[in-house]
């Protein structure tokens, strides 16, 4: 390929993966063009204005010390992290908590459920997680069996205590925005392992949710896009990718872009909406690949008022819509309580009219935190029905998906290379996985003959 002419690459998708790839290829002398369907960069990182001049994370937010590539990138871009505040007591509305039937207040984050039953659940999950081969989950011993079962089947077979059964879907919703009926057990075990294990993924201090990017994670992409300037083309939805012996041509509604290579940095369900010529040997998504299901609700207060009541803002709820809440307040100023609507509940909630969504969210927050006044603003971000993401936090691999799609996850299709968090076996589904996939694809393109 290096026969004297300046090499060129078209990158599809201006999320963390695409922009990491574009930046890396540009640094190696490639003429790059980035095609992005949305009118903004950032993909599943997205800052919305919660109050005048204050952005909060409507998309990805949390990171931990093992997210080394993301942390290094953020530092290079002049961004700082801020700790996720988790001081004080939690609120739990799990059905049987307080004598009066209302939400209960407990120190720490451990739910007021049978400790032995939850300990047993975590042990069983840890056994599954330890057995998985993180770099190639399809080669896990017993993969063929584990990839026929959904997490719901597994829970039915293994969880006998009602408290473990109650907690399992809430845990899955929080960890990977999944309805247990939609993910295979192999994917669940892989996801937990890939993210550093159950304890690391679930933890704030010392874990994957320890910090946030001060001012919002979207800034990472915004700052990467700056030096690329007009080479990042917004509002360009890619429809087709054609290859001949000499080049690849990427077609959008506005025109065609010809290059030596293309990097597709998209979630698999969206990569499959593109027409390929020659055709892909197999679709990127499997037959049962589902959209991750999360809707984020931001409840804005003039200050983090719950702290004065000794509360951390953390809550876990058996009944939706807000299955959990967390304190996402910026270091100074307003208070932001973020509610996560996940799993099967996200499907119900996302289908409601906006005014009903708001009423349900505010009503539930009033039950959980009766000491707080009504929020001064409510923002609802539906990722499930976002046509440019088709779910979040990441694609959910269902039964059969890993065995079929895993072995060719990163295999180039001639001049087409693949990036995106769903192509990373380390920190799959997370920002860190996206950045690592971008770096991997740069090395892969440079290694072409
Ligand atoms: C609500 C939410 C919470 C999350 N929480 C966390 C968290 O706390 N910590 C964490 O690490 N991760 C979290 N994540 C996941 C994290 O955001 C993703 O793993 C990461 O941002 C994915 O980056 P990516 O570049 O692989 O994909 P994306 O960000 O999805 O980028 C793909 C890009 O391709 C564009 N595109 C799609 N189709 C086309 C097309 N046909 N033509 C052109 N462009 C197209 C899209 O618009 C998008 O910009 C969360 C995500 C969400 C949404």
Image (cartoon, rainbow, N blue to C red):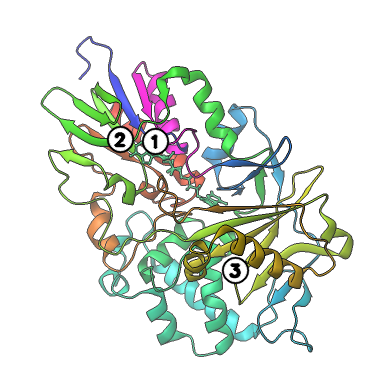
* Contact flag, marks 3 and 1 (Cβ < 8 Å): no
Which residue is denoted by mark 3 in the rendering? 321
Q: Residues within 10 Å of mark 2 (few under 14, many from 20)?
A: many
Q: Quadrant of residue 338?
A: bottom right
Q: Is residue 254 left or right of residue 300?
A: left
**Residue 436 visible from this viewpoint:** yes
> Which residue is the site of mark 2?
238
Q: First in sequence, mark 2 or 1: give its number.
A: 1
Q: Any mark on residue 47, and which?
A: none
Q: Marks 3 and 2, Cα distance to the nearest angstrom?
A: 35 Å
Q: Which span of residues is magenta-colored? A: 16-45
> What's the residue at 58%, 56% (across, down)?
296
First along the sequence among labels 3 and 1: 1
Q: Picture coordinates of residue 3 (x, y %)?
A: 19, 12
The residue identified by callout 1 is 37
Whole-percent x, y for residue 257 in the image: 26, 23
Tag 2 near tag 1, CB within 8 Å: yes
Q: Residues within 10 Å of mark 1 (few under 14, many from 20)?
A: some
Image quarter (top left, top right, bottom left or bottom right) of the N terminus: top left
Rendered location of residue 232, percent (x, y) = 42, 24
């Amino acid at each position: 390929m290096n026969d004297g002419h300046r090499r060129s690459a078209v990158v599809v998708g201006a999320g963390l993966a695409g922009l990491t790839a574009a930046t890396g290829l540009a640094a190696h002398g490639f003429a790059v063009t980035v095609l992005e369907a949305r009118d903004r960069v950032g993909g599943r990182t997205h800052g919305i204005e919660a109050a005048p001049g204050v952005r909060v994370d409507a998309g990805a937010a949390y990171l931990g010390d093992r997210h080394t590539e993301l942390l290094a990138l953020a530092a290079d871009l002049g961004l700082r992290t801020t700790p996720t505040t988790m001081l004080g007591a939690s609120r739990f509305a799990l059905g049987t908590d307080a004598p009066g039937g209302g939400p209960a207040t407990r120190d720490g984050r451990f739910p007021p459920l049978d400790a032995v039953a939850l300990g047993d659940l975590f042990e069983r999950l840890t056994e599954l997680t330890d057995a998985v081969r993180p770099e190639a989950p399809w080669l896990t011993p017993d993969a063929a069996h584990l990839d026929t079962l959904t997490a719901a089947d597994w829970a039915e077979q293994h969880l006998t205590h009602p408290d473990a059964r109650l907690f399992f879907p809430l845990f899955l919703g929080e960890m990977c925005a999944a309805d247990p009926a939609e993910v295979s057990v192999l994917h669940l075990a892989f996801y937990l392992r890939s993210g550093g294990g159950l304890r690391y993924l679930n933890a704030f201090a010392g874990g994957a949710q320890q910090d946030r990017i001060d001012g919002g994670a979207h800034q990472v992409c915004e700052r990467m896009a700056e030096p690329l300037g007009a080479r990042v083309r917004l509002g360009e939805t890619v429809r087709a990718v054609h290859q001949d012996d000499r080049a690849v041509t990427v077609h959008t509604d506005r025109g065609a872009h010809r290059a030596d290579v293309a990097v597709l940095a998209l979630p698999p369900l969206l990569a499959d909406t593109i027409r390929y010529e020659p055709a892909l040997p197999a679709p990127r998504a499997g037959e049962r690949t589902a959209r991750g299901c999360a809707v984020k609700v931001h409840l804005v207060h003039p200050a983090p008022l719950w702290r004065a009541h000794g509360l951390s803002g953390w809550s876990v709820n058996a009944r939706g819509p807000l299955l959990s809440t967390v304190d996402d307040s910026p270091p100074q100023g307003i208070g932001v309580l973020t509610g996560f609507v996940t799993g099967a509940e996200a499907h119900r909630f996302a289908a409601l009219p906006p005014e009903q969504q708001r009423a349900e969210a505010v009503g539930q927050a009033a039950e959980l935190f009766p000491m707080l006044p009504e929020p001064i603003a409510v923002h609802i971000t539906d990722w499930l029905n976002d046509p440019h993401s088709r779910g979040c936090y990441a694609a959910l691999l269902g039964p059969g998906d890993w065995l079929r799609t895993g072995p060719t996850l990163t295999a180039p299709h001639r001049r087409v290379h693949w990036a995106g968090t769903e192509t990373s076996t380390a920190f799959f589904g997370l920002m860190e996985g996206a950045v690592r996939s971008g770096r991997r694809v740069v090395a892969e393109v440079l290694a072409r003959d």
